[in-house]
Image (cartoon, rainbow, N blue to C red):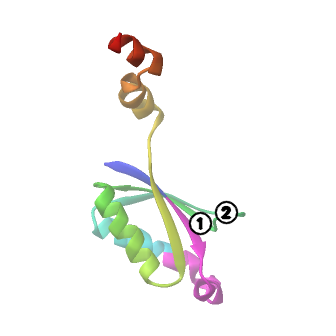
Amino acid sequence: MARFICLVTYTQEGLKQIGMTTKRSDAFAKRVEQLGGKVLATYWTLGVYDIVHVMEAPDAKMAAAIAMSLGALGNVRTHTMPAFSLEEMKDEILENVQNPYDLLKADL
């Protein structure tokens, strides 16, 4: 399953009912599971973002549907992005990265 980071900011409506934030988070985690994913961790943060969810979803389309469903409630806005583990970076991504100079040499 693919991992995603969901960065969350409260809307004015969400701030009006801030005392419900943990209950809304629990409901979000249940909805993610209903859609075939899993919330791995949730953190309330200081700064630009108010909440960070680390979640798994079957694919990017389902992650988008999850994030849009959360935002549609009107309490938060979301920014969701794929996340890669150390193993994925080392074993699957970096092995396919080519040095630009190697690309130039291949054309010579």
Q: Which residues are magenta?
A: 6-24
User: In the picture, residue 9 is in which quadrant?
Assistant: bottom right
Residue 59 left/right relative to 101: left
- Tag of residue 86: none
- Give yes or no for contact between labels 2 and 1 (Cβ–Cβ under 8 Å): yes
Q: Which residue is mark 2?
A: 45
Position of residue 22 relative to residue 79, above or below, is below
- Image coordinates for residue 7, horizontal then vertical, percent: 54, 62
Q: Residue at x 35, y 29 (%)?
A: 92
User: In the picture, residue 8 is in which quadrant?
Assistant: bottom right
Q: Callout 1: 10 Å neighbours few (<14), some, many (20+)? A: many
- Image coordinates for residue 79, horizontal then vertical, percent: 50, 64
User: Circle 1 — which element?
Assistant: strand
Magenta span: chief secondary structure: helix
Which residue is more in the foreground, 33 or 2? 2
- Image coordinates for residue 44, horizontal then vertical, percent: 63, 65
Q: Residue at x 44, y 32 (%)?
A: 89
Q: Amino acid at mark 2?
A: Thr
User: In the picture, residue 21 is in which quadrant?
Assistant: bottom right
Q: Amino acid at mark 1?
A: Ile
Q: Which residue is mark 1?
A: 51
Residue 10 left/right relative to 47: left
Question: Is residue 19 one of those drawn in magenta?
Answer: yes
Give the quadrant of the C terminus: top left
